[in-house]
Every structure is written in C-alpha cells, then in structure tokens.
Amino acid sequence: MTLQFEAFCAGGLAPGWSLTVQGHADAGEEKFEINFLTDAGDIAFHVKPRFSSATVVGNAFQGGRWGQEEVSSIFPLTLGEPFEMEVSADAEHFHIYAQEQKVLQFPHRHRPLATITRVRVLSEHRLAQVELAKRSLSWGDGGY
C-alpha cells in the first residue's frame, strides 16, 4: 500500500483529536487503512475497512503482537463511490464513522494517549482530503 498521509501529533494524542479522510473507493480496490503510532513503534490503533466481507476491523499491535480484532458489520461504504471516514478520540475510546454513521467504538489499549504521536493513512484509493484536527471538548451552557 502507498503512504498517502503522515502527520505528527504535537504533544501526543489527547481527547478531542480527530482525523477525517475523504476519497473515492475505486472499484476493485480494497486497500485502505489508518494507523495511530506510538514513539516506541507500536500501532496503538489500526482501522481497516474490508470491502470483501463488508466489515470494519479495529486492532492494536503492541509488544510485537496483534491483539484481538474487533469487527463491525455496519458498513455504509460502496466500491466505486466517494467515501468519508472519521476517527475521533475521547478519554476512553476511538470512535469510527463512515459516511457520517458510527461503525465502531474501540477502547484504548495503549496508555497514556500522549505517547501516540503519529498518524498514517495508507491507501490505493484516490484520496481527496485528509484533515487532522484537535477540537476542544466542552460541556454545559457556557455560563448563560
């Protein structure tokens, strides 16, 4: 697979970070994955849509071994069509959305989150846009 995007997360990952990927799922291509990497070289979170089985798979690679896969059969992606995937993080989970529909919630297996410092998107699909952003998390009425 071709590395299409790589970014450094200044200060490491924290609740509020999100990654949005937009592209076109070229017919006949199934190769697309997102990896959140640690300073030590582990993959703290790996997410991959599998068009052949219409599933989204999440996993982590730590200490030289893959963990137990978490598989979702919620799969709103279609080969030959444009797609959008978003991965966001809160204090406890990664949340994965495809076409604005939640497809998977994956508990953090690697802590502290701040040691997750890089994001890579590997793909054979045509990507139109990749955005990594840190959004503030807020709650309440703002003092009104």
Image: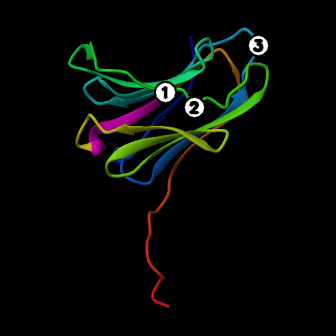
Tell me the residue that label 2 is attached to. 74
Q: Earlier in the sequence, mark 2 or mark 1?
A: 2
Q: Label 3 vs label 1: CA separation? A: 23 Å
Instruction: Give the residue at x 41% y 41%.
Output: 94
Along the line of sight, which residue is nearer the eye, 42 or 98?
A: 98
Pointer 1 local density, CA inside 10 Å: few below 14, some 14–19, many at least 20: some
96 or 42: nearer the viewer:
96
**CA separation in Å, label 2 and label 3:** 20 Å
> Which dot, 2 or 3, sits closer to the camera?
2
Label 1 secondary element: strand
The question of residue 116 being in magenta is answered with: yes
Q: Amino acid at mark 3?
A: Ala
Disc 3 vs disc 1: Cβ atoms closer than 8 Å?
Answer: no
The local crowd at label 2, few if under 14, some if 14 to 19, many if 20 or more residues have their Cα within 10 Å, is: some
Which callout, 3 or 1, points at the residue further toward the start of the chain? 3
Secondary element under disc 3, as helix, strand or loop, is loop
The image shows residue 51, relative to residue 10, as above or below, that is: above
Q: Does residue 128 appear anywhere in the picture?
A: no
Real-space Cα distance between discs 2 and 1?
23 Å
Which region is colored magenta? 113-120
Towards the viewer: 34 or 3: 34
User: Which residue, as the protein is rendered here, is positioned at the far left?
Assistant: 63
